[in-house]
Amino acid sequence: MSGSVYGNIFKISTWGESHGRGIGVVIDGCPAGIRLEDADIQRDLDRRKPGTGKYTTKRSESDKAEILSGVFEGKTTGTPISIAIFNEDQRSKDYSAISDVFRPGHADFGFESKYGFRDYRGGGRSSARETAARVAAGAVARRLLEEIGISIAAYTFSINNIQISKDNFDLEQRFLNPLCMPDSEAAERAAKLLDEAMANADSTGGVVQCEVTGLKPGIGEPVFDKLDASIGKAVLSIGAVKGIEFGAGFEASKMYGSENNDSFYIKDGAVKKHTNNSGGVLGGMSDGDKLVFRAAFKPTPSIARPQTTANNKGEDIKIEIKGRHDPIVVARAVVVVEAMTAVTLADLVLMNMCAKIENVKKIYTDI
Amino acid sequence: MSGSVYGNIFKISTWGESHGRGIGVVIDGCPAGIRLEDADIQRDLDRRKPGTGKYTTKRSESDKAEILSGVFEGKTTGTPISIAIFNEDQRSKDYSAISDVFRPGHADFGFESKYGFRDYRGGGRSSARETAARVAAGAVARRLLEEIGISIAAYTFSINNIQISKDNFDLEQRFLNPLCMPDSEAAERAAKLLDEAMANADSTGGVVQCEVTGLKPGIGEPVFDKLDASIGKAVLSIGAVKGIEFGAGFEASKMYGSENNDSFYIKDGAVKKHTNNSGGVLGGMSDGDKLVFRAAFKPTPSIARPQTTANNKGEDIKIEIKGRHDPIVVARAVVVVEAMTAVTLADLVLMNMCAKIENVKKIYTDI
Amino acid sequence: MSGSVYGNIFKISTWGESHGRGIGVVIDGCPAGIRLEDADIQRDLDRRKPGTGKYTTKRSESDKAEILSGVFEGKTTGTPISIAIFNEDQRSKDYSAISDVFRPGHADFGFESKYGFRDYRGGGRSSARETAARVAAGAVARRLLEEIGISIAAYTFSINNIQISKDNFDLEQRFLNPLCMPDSEAAERAAKLLDEAMANADSTGGVVQCEVTGLKPGIGEPVFDKLDASIGKAVLSIGAVKGIEFGAGFEASKMYGSENNDSFYIKDGAVKKHTNNSGGVLGGMSDGDKLVFRAAFKPTPSIARPQTTANNKGEDIKIEIKGRHDPIVVARAVVVVEAMTAVTLADLVLMNMCAKIENVKKIYTDI
Amino acid sequence: MSGSVYGNIFKISTWGESHGRGIGVVIDGCPAGIRLEDADIQRDLDRRKPGTGKYTTKRSESDKAEILSGVFEGKTTGTPISIAIFNEDQRSKDYSAISDVFRPGHADFGFESKYGFRDYRGGGRSSARETAARVAAGAVARRLLEEIGISIAAYTFSINNIQISKDNFDLEQRFLNPLCMPDSEAAERAAKLLDEAMANADSTGGVVQCEVTGLKPGIGEPVFDKLDASIGKAVLSIGAVKGIEFGAGFEASKMYGSENNDSFYIKDGAVKKHTNNSGGVLGGMSDGDKLVFRAAFKPTPSIARPQTTANNKGEDIKIEIKGRHDPIVVARAVVVVEAMTAVTLADLVLMNMCAKIENVKKIYTDI
């Protein structure tokens, strides 16, 4: 229970360090009969691959995913799906400069306090590389959700103080510019801001927004495993996330009930809402509307300029973090947010299967 | 797995509806030997009790907690602690006006979609009354944490656009004014705003801030069960919460790395941080600093003014929600936030027991 | 995680001590829409009640079950079902004679080693009374299973060396004689053996057999959560059980493959087996045949004759256990075995809901 | 939740099919600081390897284990330990003869009923090869247990009707004869019986006994996660196991309380027992004595002689199972029983860490 297992029915178990043999995931509880191939996973992995743009690190990894089990004749069999991504760039470097240092903004001090020592090579288990295993699991969950018409799209909502504009919104743009911003004009301005940050040996933060369509009402479990609480945990478990909000979010705290309440109405026999301040979730269950949330990412903590800090010998020191690091994490994080959302929704959709005895009768009778 | 069980080692299972026989919680996994009595639970329950102030509902419940098991001669025995709060105000009312209605901002539509029907009396399981069981569990967790020097204090940070000021901050004030604001001046302005809202048959939202002291570094499990992710789920699972942020939170997304990074230094041989933008958590583990987070609450959805909505017969209708309802939930929610934080920290502290083989040797040798 | 929570989807959390306020259970994850009333639970509870026959203790408890939540208008709502059985016979006795003694065959020494002290009143949490909460949970699970045509019948298979005979088998007899033996002639002989044991201030053991009909093939999860492994844990967790075997069981270890293999054949288009050495389970999944297993119970450890033992002061002592105790546990254990079987099967049937993506489509489409 | 994840704190997740890319396991929750290398795992794997003796299949696999993560500089880091065993013997064979057949005594019918289709190559996930991943996990758990002085030894107790004798008992013999019998004379007789069975194109069953020393009192959680219940599930989840019994086991059902009760006494200040009918477990917790249990294995279902059965087209057919198969599974199963015991004990020892608040104080104070 060191925290690398996630989910109740659709349960994932990830493993791997930045500079070890590789990273991977085992998925237990994926239903049988879903079409799945290596390419489904590779498609998402390629979206978070380093070395693909000006604003991502130059590490040359092909990040090639291999399905090792659980798929037969192109379909999931109901048994565990093991996916591995072996490290190619595994040459041993000289880590003596950072092996005893607590880098500001990093997990080094926590790891050493907790376990007594740590795998300091490239951040070990707390490297951003860990998220590749999440993306692989997310790709499988996405295939499951596609079978029932649920689709997920995340994108960069803001970088520092530059935010996308509704007037200029174009969802396809998130695949067309390296910052995954669905507003080409904002993307241009953000690129300039990042160029400056890089010139200053600095980094910055941003916000990712995620939208889910096709979610029917009643998904999410009342009380502790609420839809928003579950998504919240999933997304807050991504490295640099410092906050999450649903629908009107923090703005709702400044509104009046008469403004914030989304009134229901009937359209073509179906229950709809006039507004979506709820962000698609009421009482912890989906309300049939689009699920909308935003996650705040802090600036990349690895910056090139000199910093003061402490080491594990009790000394105050100065460090300069070598190597090239992303000046912003949100662009590569977009697909990670989608992945954690997909894994969580797959789990909640499966948990919802047993909500009514009518459902149980329906399935058991057909065996 | 309908979502009313929470925690891994310190595991709570809550039950009960607003207008049924009562509500309660069973706690499995509380260590033996902790001094515990009914009064420890009552103290916290009294803080969220309805009918105690101008801004809370008039329901006259004594909310009396009874420990039914797991305590012997004033100490926990290691076996499950069952706590019940029986409903006194259980007379049957006429619910025909709302039994088929989907109230705006409420869980009615979700419940009916999920389960096919619902206990419509006073909101059933989705009533705010459900949180009393959380508070009872939180009181036990708080006793556990006190034994090792961890303490938790939450308070109202803002109501609508009125925010507490650092200059006027006085933590004790949270017990002295009915809005739990640690700033008497802000509390006065907020009271006026609420008076106006009530006059308009309206409600509003607010933000709760929570601080934890005594948390040593390394608490929280890397990857999925991170400290912030776990607290995030716990707090987002409280009824009206729409967002959560840690430390600098959403503001961090607008900062540069050089500003946001908290540099470490050595003081009296211990590792400290100059600033606390992290909010006490790095890489999902406590960093030895104060844990700080804020949760945004939406306005109370039950408002007295007429609203349009739909019912389960597919009709557009008008409703007026009868009875008196809190114009704001944050004041009573403060202790609920503390409770969910306490339960989560108790669990993470226990999970951390097995981090090192040295720990295991230390305990096993002593048996 | 002190071990009082059981199940994955149909999850039960029991609480209570022999001489505390009462005992009970909270069931989370029971599907909505199942007809349920107090009487359904009372029926099973009455079968394990003390004081009903010559071979059971004289404790006069009405063992009245009360459903406190999760049922509305006679049907389960999908929210937690809390059931309590309050103790009536709660007068405080003088326990000084056993408070520091490790009774032979009892859990006293384990409890004291583990927790440092124990609730010694009537065995505390390790009293047989704890099983009443299991029976209450089992009654709810039984209602769920009835809805899909699964039924469970356990009975006394043997007492000491007296075993039921196939020639004299009559399932109804299990309700007609106080030893729950479906063979009136064997029951008579066993009664004599027990009379002698009681005359000798002694007790004896026995075996319970359980049969489940209506179980379709494929229930049980391959690898760790196999049908037999799950039932095995459930039944071995009942106080005095020392062994369990399925189908041919230990005898299978003495057979040849050609004898033990049950060959399949087709009857009316359905797959059947000529024999049932498997006991209805192959590869951890039901094979469509009757599920059959046997559990061995040790003799009641509380016997009236003097015994030597040790106490927690490190002294060798002599004890005489006062009060009347059952000379055999199997008769009252029969319904406990059914209960643990019901709870386990309910859970596995619900887990099986997500085996195929076709199932998921079928349910999700209908929302 | 397809049942391939096991454990609460020491949590293992296995994957892989007989004729896929390989098999493996991810272990989450292993404490940091335990010395571990590939050789520790290989040692146990070699004990269950096929092709090593006359009574095991001729499949030529080197079964080479590779640790892919979680170990740094020869010690566990506290992060997930991923171990893979890649299949070498992966050439595609012609499975058309069995792809639609329900082999007697096998899981084929269950798999097809549950999932709609199955990976029929060499039994897929239900192949005995699956147990190699358990053995790998067991080797890690064994290392953990060694650190605190717990050791596990299983051996063949009987084959068909040939049982080891106390007079001739020699534990070392289990490594010296191919049947793992700690009685060389019984091993010789069993070998003859197996030669005959093979000559008859038949197989037979047997019993494995397992002994654990170094287990202090109080390990195991009362009520559902009892020591014996947990071991019971673990061992019953091994392919061909049909029964398990602890201490006197089924014989206890024929004993009187006065015979079966193990009386306690004091020796050198410690609590001891005169006899061990309990098999080292009372009330679900270890009692300080040696843990002893036996598991019954059915005969290998794959036998060379012709059998009648059914296929998935609804036809009665005759089959002859090709290839060489072990005439007995117990010899190779001995190390699998040890592995499942080790994994379960590691988990229960870690769960016991939080039994007392004194333990929590001791560890938290030292951070």
Image: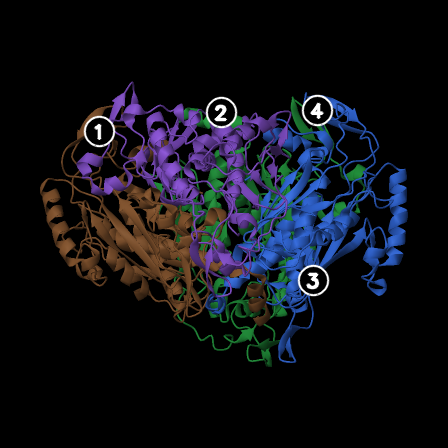
Chain colours: A blue, B green, C brown, D purple
Q: Counting other residues with Cα less than 10 Å from the Cα at mark 2, is it few (<14), some (14-19), or many (20 or more)? A: some
Distance of label 3 from label 4 (alpha carbons): 45 Å
- The type of residue carrying mark 2 is Glu
- Measuring from the top left, give residue B299's x and y in whole percent: 62, 62
User: Which numbered disc, 2 or 4, marks the residue closer to the eye?
Assistant: 2
User: Which disc number belongs to residue A100?
Assistant: 4
B117 left or right of B367 in image: right
Residue that carries the numbered disc 3 in the rendered image: A151
B72 left or right of B319 in image: left
Q: Quadrant of the C terminus of chain B?
A: top left
User: Which disc number belongs to residue D147?
Assistant: 2
Task: Note whether residue C29 is visible.
Answer: no
Q: Are discs 1 and 2 both within one chain?
A: no
Distance of label 2 from label 4 (alpha carbons): 27 Å
Distance of label 3 from label 1 (alpha carbons): 67 Å
User: Which numbered disc, 1 or 2, marks the residue closer to the eye?
Assistant: 2
Distance of label 1 from label 4 (alpha carbons): 56 Å
- Measuring from the top left, give residue C355's x and y in whole percent: 53, 58
Nearer to the camera, C261 or C245: C261
Which chain's residue wears label 2?
D
- Look at the numbered disc 4 and give the secondary structure of its residue: loop
Distance of label 1 from label 2 (alpha carbons): 32 Å
